[in-house]
Amino acid sequence: MNSRNLFYVRSLHLRFYFSKNKYIEALFYLEKFLFDNYNHDEEILISNLKQKWIYDCIEKSDYSNDITKKFQIIEQTDYKRNFLNLIESFSQIPSFIHKNKFIKKFEDFNKSFNLLLNIEDKVNLHSSVIFQLIYLSYAKKFKIDENIKKKLNFEKESIDFFESVFVDIFFKNHNYNITKIYYLTRLIYKVFRK
């Protein structure tokens, strides 16, 4: 696998927290696959089909194509069921227009994701629901509603350093084109300001 194909915040997580951990890399690839294939409007059928497809491939240990081969590492762990549960949890997230249910199901997904994130390694990284929501919004280019911001209570949650820099940049003007160079520049700037 080439972690350079991951979202750059996740690539930094891999490099600094989970060096050479193929299990966590597979988890980040699954997150990326789910987010890239989420459809936030009424027509979620294609999104559900893609989730069902990846679920079936993992369940049947079919790692024969370029997408699924990234998840073959989970066969060597006891966490295959947890990965399948994560996909099920994500598939429960409704269309974005159902705000209350969307928030509840997205928070459930975030909890399942964090359980997998910390199941094997001694690193205690907690990926914030705020970051994941912004990551999804960034990947799919949809605006986060003010009501959702209020319900998630953005002030209370502690956020990982790498995630917080991305969140700050995004919320300055709902920037959907944050280059890796710009992100790294802001990251370095924040390190030196501390």
Image (tube, rainbow, N blue to C red):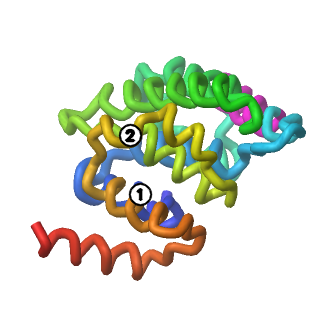
- Three-letter code for the amino acid on which mark 2 is drawn: Ser
Q: Using a 10 Å C-alpha cutoff, classify the residue at mark 2 as few (fewer than 14 neighbours), some (14 to 19) or many (20 or more).
A: many
Residue 128 numbered tag = 2
- Figure quadrant of the C terminus: bottom left
Residue 187 location in percent, x, y? 28, 71
Task: State the separation of the CA atoms marked 1 and 2.
Answer: 10 Å
Foreground pick, 117 / 38: 38
Q: What stretch is highlighted in magenta?
A: 49-61
- Say whether residue 87 is magenta: no
Q: Position of residue 72 (x, y in %)?
A: 54, 38
Residue 61 visible at all: no
Q: Does 134 appear above or below 77?
A: below
Task: Note whether residue 166 is visible.
Answer: yes
Residue that appears at 87% across and 38% down:
42
Q: Where is residue 56 in the image (x, y as percent from the top left)?
A: 73, 27
Q: Is residue 85 left or right of residue 191?
A: right
Could you tell me if the residues under marks 1 and 2 are in contact, i.e. CB atoms within 8 Å? yes
x, y (%) of residue 93?
Answer: 67, 29
Mark 1 belongs to which amino acid?
Val
Quick check: 85 left or right of 44? Answer: left
The vertical placement of 146 against 79, above or below, is: below
Numbered mark located on residue 167 in the image: 1
- The answer to whether 4 is drawn above or below residue 135 in the figure is below
Q: Residue at x 25, y 55 (%)?
A: 161
Residue 56 inside the magenta-drawn segment: yes
